[in-house]
Amino acid sequence: MSEGVSPARRVAYSTLSSWREGQEFLEDLLEGKAERAALSREDRRLAQALAYGVTRRLRLLDFWIDSLSSKGLASLPAPVADIERIALFQLAFLERIPAHAVVHEAVAQCSQAGVSGLKGVVNATLRNFSRKRAELEKHLELLPNRLGIETSHPDWLVDWAADRWGLVKSALWLNANNEIPSSFLWPLSSRLLKSEELERAPEEKGRSAAKRLVERLGIGELSPEGEAVVLPAGTIPGDLPAFREGLAEIQDPAAREAVKLLDPQPGEKVLDLCCAPGGKTLQIADKMRGLGELVAVDSSADRLVRVRENLERCGFPSVEVLRRDLLEPWGDWEGRADALLLDAPCSGLGTLRRRVDLRYRITPNDFAELAERAAQLLGNAARLVRPGGRLVYSTCTLSAQENEAVIAGFLEGHSHEWRLIRSGYFPPWLAPGEIPAVPSEAPGSDASYSALLLKTPIRS
């Protein structure tokens, strides 16, 4: 162990260095490095807070470093920049570690990183930050790209958001993307309630199951609508007996809207397309209570491993799991499904809080490519639904090109056969034209889009 450098900080530094140099996702890098370093639970939480926090605030941290360095950020070796990013994030956003300890650890890490000769530079930058922070904030206020730097989003994405919603709502969304998301544990009603309780109205049933779950857990609190348990920060779901026993699933509220709109019923034939990692599959299986036929389909064999594990954990052995190329039509299911969920691959703009490095990966050109693919998937999926059946198209993005435009294009070519019943965004304030009643509504959850389509019944 490097003297004066904590295990958590060493893993965070290594994760950020590898992420900067390669194409792997930050989440995967951190998980692997934390595992190999055998970090304790507390150190793992700190390493995640540092790596994720630096990534969420990267442009702002780099602005500070560039302003505080005599020759600018570009003059610094990459290891020095990463060391200063971690330390500045701690000084600005974490209060649990004293400032003198943060500076001492950053200077000590220079030896580990092979830049011992620049200890004085690191020390001076960090000590100047506390003295000059107010001055830096005044300077930032004058810059035309202030919002992009302040919220650490690419300028093109800031412009996209402003065009989509206007300045007020776009600023709410950009800041919400830097909030640390809560973990929501949703009860599986079919595993927690008695048969007579399962016949209650969905909301009543959900609240009853959530109360029973929180009693079993002994931790957490009920969500505002009372149908989920919000876990305390740092809780590892896999450590909870109720989770291991298959009584609950982890899912953001936004991810649940599509299945609520589909409303699968016991006894129906249901297809869940693009199903991995299986959260919506579990939600559908729970609603169907093992009655009917549910088939979960994805094109990735690796991702289907997780789906099977989730189904096995939660006791849904009757769900069939298939690997198929969803861009190819499959005749054996044509016209058979009572209900079909297509959770289309998308740009993921609704998940930027959780997928912390996604904002730096996506480009404006991605929207058109993903929308074209989604349209192909929707056209193929529609053929699998019986007359009188229903289809829900869903994404976790906010791009109209991937959402409203895909649905409009599909209906234009199938107006004689399909009609739109309902569509919208979750949370509702993210729909164009809507403004949250109070700013605190903005960070409540991730975001999603869902559209319910009905296939015209055959007239007798």
Image (cartoon, helix red, strand yellow):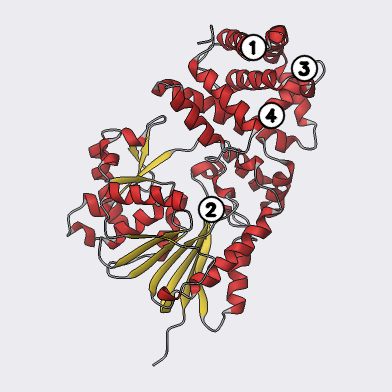
Which numbered marker is on residue 404? Answer: none
Write the residue at 37% across / 56% down: 281
Which numbered marker is on residue 60? Answer: 4
Q: Label 1 vs label 4: CA separation?
A: 22 Å
N-terminal of the two: label 2 or label 3?
3
N-terminal of the two: label 1 or label 4?
4
The amino acid type of the residue labelled 3 equals Ser
The amino acid type of the residue labelled 2 equals Cys
Write the residue at 65% across / 31% down: 20
Q: Quadrant of the C terminus?
A: bottom left
Residue denoted by label 2: 396
Quadrant assignment, res 129: top right
Write the residue at 59% across / 62% down: 403
Residue denoted by label 3: 69
N-terminal of the two: label 3 or label 4?
4
Relative placement, left or right, of 9 versus 76 is left
Q: Could you tell me if residue 202 is visible in this image?
A: no
CB contact under 8 Å: marks 2 and 3 = no
The amino acid type of the residue labelled 1 equals Cys
Mark nearest the camera among 1 and 3 is: 1
- Give SS at disc 1: helix
Asked whether 169 or 304 is in front, the reply is 304
Residue denoted by label 1: 110
